[in-house]
Amino acid sequence: MKIAYLVAAHNNYLHLQKLINALNNCDCTFYIHIDKKSVIPDIKGERIFFIKNRVNVFWSGFSQVKATLNLMKQAIKGNHDYYAFISGTDYPVKPNAYLVQLLQNGGEYIQINKIGQDPFAPLSRYKYYYFTDYYSRRNKNAWQTKFFLWFQKLLRKCRIKKAVPYNLFTGASWFALSKECINYILNHLELDKNYIKFFKTGFCPDESFFQTIIGNSPFYQQVKGNLTYADWSVDPGPALINENHLPVLKQSNDKFFARKFNDQSQVIIDLIDKELRIDLLLK
């Protein structure tokens, strides 16, 4: 089982090294995208590649999709069996053998909901115009932010919106997809030149872009849900994983990763390694 880890990161490089060390005991390769605004860390290894085609990533913008696509296009050349897209602030919460066995059973591990099923991912995200790659939504005082927020509201007030030519699906960004599914996605984008154009002006398109392709394909019947646990009970989320999450993680039989962690997460990582990443499959 050859696994390609597609990693999106921009900080917390001490933790990124721990993540790589934790996963790097099987036939796997790491393809890492570092936000263009950030410095590439001094992490080296025989199967660790920092992709050169970097993107200036803005939260909720199409730039997040672009970074993922760049990772896919680089990694597909390696002819791996599965491609797991994760954050640099993830960490495995089960033995690596658990993931290998899971993937050997086949299927596509991604969360997919029909549009409207998730109240936090409404149709308005995609039928109205957003320009979030041109400003930072989290910097409310910047003139670019003020202008584009005003402009987006003006377009909506004037009832200017896009036609929605696709049967939309939504879900969390993270996934583990088969080589066949990755090839299908990349081929689909070659055939439908308007697909990227439609999502470029959406809000959080990374939570619909890949889900919509798969949801309208034969691979939809093979979807088994995503493998990443996150706690969204805080605002802004997700919450940092701490000792209080251990009972939940122990009971999350369908999750292999959890997020998020940072460079100060050594105590909880030690507990996870000791209590959750023991080789349960040998018991």
Image (cartoon, rainbow, N blue to C red):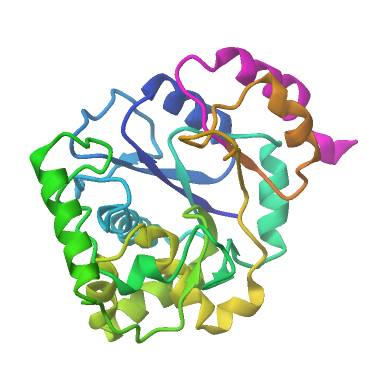
Above-or-below relation of 66 to 283: below
Q: 237 above or below 152? A: above
Q: Residue at x 69, y 60 (%)?
A: 104
Most distant residue in the front direction:
157
Quadrant in which residue 88 is drawn = top left
Is 154 above or below relative to 54? below
Q: Which residue lies furthest to the right in this view?
A: 283
Q: Is residue 243 left or right of residue 157?
A: right
Q: Which of 134 and 41 is in front in this view?
A: 134
Residue for point 22% across, 61% down = 153
Residue name at image x 47 percent, y 45 percent: 86
The residue at 21%/77% (across/down) is 160
Q: Assign the C terminus to one quadrant of the image.
A: top right
Residue 263 falls inside the magenta stretch: yes
The location of residue 105, given as percent across then percent down, is: 72, 63
Between residue 155 and residue 270, name the one nearer to us. Answer: 155
Q: Provide the residue span drawn in magenta.
A: 259-283
What is the x, y in percent for residue 277?
72, 30
Residue 201 appears left or right of 15: left
Residue 132 percent across, percent down from the top left: 22, 53
Image location of residue 106, percent across then percent down: 67, 66
Quadrant into which the N terminus falls: bottom right
Q: Does the magenta stretch include residue 114?
A: no
Q: How many labels does the image show?
A: 0
Left or right placement of residue 118 versus residue 7 in this view: right
Quadrant for residue 274, please give it.
top right
User: 154 or 163: nearer the eye?
Assistant: 154
Against 126, residue 26 (above or below) is above
- Left or right of 215 in this view: 247: right
